[in-house]
Amino acid sequence: YLPQAWFEDSHAEDRKKAGVPEELAFQTKPELGWQMIKRTQERQIPFVAVAMDDLYGRNGALRQNLNQAGIEYYGDIPANTRVYLEKPQFIYPLTKRGTPSKTPQIIGTAYEVQELRQKNGLAWQNLRLRTSERGYLEATFTRLRVWMVYGEEARQEWLLIRQDATRNTYVLSN
């Protein structure tokens, strides 16, 4: 990974000294991650799923690519990530000129995932994850279907919520 600033003209000499190929263009870490996953598949290296910290997990384009490729994923997301419990609708309000807007308005109630921890009717389950130096590592989990917005479409994903002794974590999965 190279920072975006390294691809500016002012860093041309630095790139040359470091041996960076001239044709190389800036890519974000999630874009580079997707390239690595595709190469792994092309080389037929077996794997079951992709697990991602929140830098990668909150990246909708990466999750969309994984889903379209049929790859199971588990991506950590920040507690303030907004999701919908019902499929949101998209409308294109008229502009002052009377033509439909190019940007849709999303109709629906969005929730931060941390709010959903308190939702009634969730089926919480204690799971023993693995052994540790102090015995077993255990946590309590629940899951529910949520809707995420990708540009001008909505897609359902699983929201997994984990509670343990010190924190709550949130994961999106297909």
Image: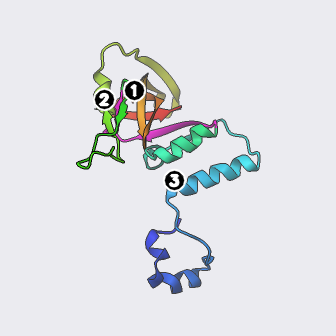
As for residue 77 lying within the magenta part, the answer is yes
The residue type indicated by label 3 comes to Pro
The residues bearing labels 3 and 1 have C-alpha atoms spaced at a distance of 27 Å
Counting residues from the start of the chain, the first of labels 3 and 2 encountered is: 3
* Quarter assignment of residue 79: top left
Say whether residue 134 is left or right of residue 118: right
- The residue pinned by badge 2 equals 108
Dot 1 and dot 2 residues touching (CB under 8 Å): yes
Q: Is label 3 in contact with label 1 (beta carbons under 8 Å)?
A: no
Marks 3, 1: nearer the viewer: 1
- Residues under numbered marks 3 and 2 in contact, where contact means CB atoms less than 8 Å apart: no
Cα distance in 3D space between marks 3 and 2: 29 Å
Point out residue 136 in the picture as x, y percentages from the top left corner.
49, 26
For this rendering, which residue is in front, 76 or 144?
A: 144
168 relative to 62, above or below:
above
Amino acid type, residue under disc 1 in the picture:
Lys
The amino acid type found where label 2 is placed reads Gly
> Badge 2 local density, few (<14 within 10 Å), some, or many (20+)?
some
Q: Which residue is mark 1?
A: 87
Q: Position of residue 16 (x, y in %)?
A: 58, 84
Q: Between label 3 and label 2, give the one nearer the viewer.
A: 2
Residue displayed at 36% across by 24% down = 85
Residue farthest toward the bottom in the current orientation of the protein: 13
**Which residue was labeled with disc 3?**
30
Magenta span: 70-84
